[in-house]
Image: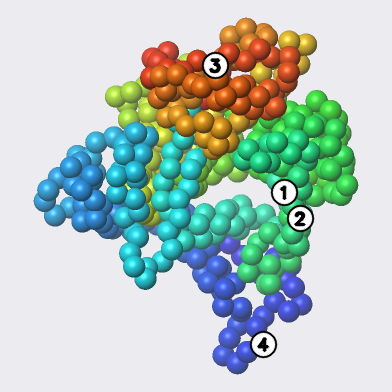
């Protein structure tokens, strides 16, 4: 267990009311963080017993509430042992159940249920229904990692993200959001840094200018944004910003950047997650590229019936079961990635550990002028422009971006023009954008179904 006494506290850290120690919300958060740590890093037998009970509850819930799932599950009284009989769940299966039945937690007078549409990094957006508990878990599990890795909450934190809505993409200019703290109720107890969120709109000069305004200890972003900083200022610029840890998200992480940051004393830690699920695994602080599964949230399987080759290794298809997916059950879900799954980590962590994850796209275009240009358009943004079931972007020629829109026999002149304008706005007018409507995209050459590929980058 982690030691809390060495963490800097606020002068008013403790509650003034009789028979209380901490603010109730902070105490709940701290209790849940300790519980997560116990489950994920404590006794394996106790953890697996807890997970098996969660699997039993989830399977019975799906069987009781959903005609769709009754058609997929054994008809008898279910336990966790029935998992081996559950077929692999695809994105299409999730869409069918969600569209047909809506939320399985919706009830008059019950807790509010919302929906979430993934960014569709693999080409097909996934819409799921979520409960308030799902959102709370994601927040508290993220905070737990700072305690598990013994990282201070007192550092200022900067996150760089792309525009994920059409309205923000059309604004063109950098958007910045600043808050006084980032640890929620725990900021009442522990000294906590400020939080800044920067929405990058492909204006690198504005990004550098904004980052240079003040020092900060934690940088949270995808590799493609680190590439911009390294190209503009190199390791010296990162050192000047005061960065101590880079938390990598979403895309392929360049080992050369990791090495360059290590040389100046900056740690790199990566997370493996999915919008429709939340945290899946967190990188081992001792062994780069090995990810401890977030046992309090998911169970991960490695299906050797479908494999891919990467770096000389044979990787299995990763199947993820979301233990808390009561609104939209996610059970043995083919997330679209491949990897290796070991029973333990080389560091000694006694729990399933993922390595050699393949599928996190590089998302780079080669500009006709020669430079690399980060490419990102979320399918949420695209769906604001036109309806589709799946999409694929390809750069097979230096000056051309090809777009395939799946689930469509044809596009209107207006839809095609709007789509081309969107792609141009997100990239560069130097590219010729070619749009093709198809009933179904042929993914046979890419089992990962990568949203974007470039053969010239």
**Of the pair 179 and 260, the residue shown nearer to us:** 179
Question: To which residue does mark 3 refer?
Answer: 435
Q: Nearer the viewer, mark 1 or mark 4?
A: 1
Q: Are marks 2 and 1 in contact (CB under 8 Å)?
A: yes
- Say if residue 9 shows up in the picture: yes
First in sequence, mark 3 or 1: give its number.
1
The residue sitting at the top extreme is: 397
First in sequence, mark 2 or 3: give its number.
2
Q: Secondary structure at mark 2?
A: strand
Residue at 66% of width from left, 41% of height from top? 167
Decide: few, some or many residues near mark 3? Use Cα within 10 Å; few <14, some 14-19, many ≥20: some
Q: Whole-Å distance between the Cαs marked 2 and 3?
A: 39 Å
| Picture mark count | 4
Residue at 62% of width from left, 40% of height from top? 165
**Of the pair 368 and 408, the residue shown nearer to us:** 408
Q: Is residue 90 left or right of residue 423?
A: left
Question: To which residue does mark 1 refer?
Answer: 197
The residue sitting at the bottom extreme is: 18
Q: Are marks 1 and 4 in contact (CB under 8 Å)?
A: no
First in sequence, mark 1 or 4: give its number.
4
Label placed on residue 123: none
The correct choice, above or below, for 233 with respect to 371 in the image is below
Decide: few, some or many residues near mark 4? Use Cα within 10 Å; few <14, some 14-19, many ≥20: few
């Amino acid at each position: 267990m982690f030691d809390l006494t060495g963490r800097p506290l606020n002068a008013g850290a403790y509650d003034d009311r009789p028979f209380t120690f901490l603010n109730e919300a902070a105490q709940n958060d701290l209790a849940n963080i300790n519980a997560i740590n116990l489950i994920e890093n404590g006794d394996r037998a106790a953890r697996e017993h807890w997970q098996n009970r969660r699997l039993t509850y989830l399977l019975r819930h799906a069987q009781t509430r959903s005609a769709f799932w009754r058609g997929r599950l054994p008809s008898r009284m279910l336990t966790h042992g029935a998992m081996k009989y559950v077929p692999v769940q695809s994105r299409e299966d999730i869409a069918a159940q969600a569209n047909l039945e809506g939320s399985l937690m919706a009830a008059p007078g019950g807790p509010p249920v919302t929906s979430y549409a993934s960014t569709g990094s693999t080409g097909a957006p996934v819409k799921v229904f979520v409960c308030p508990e799902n959102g709370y878990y994601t927040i508290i599990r993220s905070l737990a990692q700072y305690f598990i890795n013994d990282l201070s909450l007192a550092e200022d934190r900067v996150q760089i993200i792309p525009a994920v809505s059409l309205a923000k993409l059309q604004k063109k200019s950098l958007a910045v959001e600043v808050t006084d703290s980032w640890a929620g109720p725990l900021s009442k107890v522990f000294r906590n840094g400020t939080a800044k969120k920067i929405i990058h709109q492909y204006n690198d000069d504005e990004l550098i200018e904004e980052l240079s305004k003040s020092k900060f200890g934690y940088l949270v972003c995808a590799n493609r944004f680190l590439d911009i900083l390294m190209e503009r200022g190199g390791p010296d610029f990162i050192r000047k910003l005061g960065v101590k840890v880079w938390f990598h998200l979403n895309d392929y992480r360049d080992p050369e950047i990791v090495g360059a940051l290590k040389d100046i004393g900056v740690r790199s830690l990566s997370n493996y997650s999915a919008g429709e699920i939340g945290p899946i695994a967190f990188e081992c602080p001792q062994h780069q590229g090995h990810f401890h599964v977030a046992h309090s949230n998911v169970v991960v399987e490695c299906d050797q019936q479908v494999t891919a080759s990467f770096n000389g290794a044979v990787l299995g298809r990763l199947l993820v079961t979301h233990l808390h997916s009561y609104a939209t059950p996610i059970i043995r879900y083919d997330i679209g990635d491949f990897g290796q799954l070991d029973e333990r980590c080389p560091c000694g962590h006694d729990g399933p550990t993922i390595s050699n994850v393949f599928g996190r796209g590089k998302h780079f275009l080669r500009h006709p002028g020669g430079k690399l240009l980060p490419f990102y358009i979320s399918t949420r943004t695209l769906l604001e422009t036109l309806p589709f079931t799946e999409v694929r972007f390809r750069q097979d020629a230096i000056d051309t971006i090809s777009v395939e829109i799946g689930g469509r026999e044809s596009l209107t002149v207006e839809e095609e023009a709007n789509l081309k304008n969107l792609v141009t706005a997100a990239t560069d007018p130097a590219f010729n954008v070619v749009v093709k409507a198809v009933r179904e995209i042929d993914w046979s050459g890419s089992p990962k179904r990568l949203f974007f590929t470039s053969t010239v980058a």
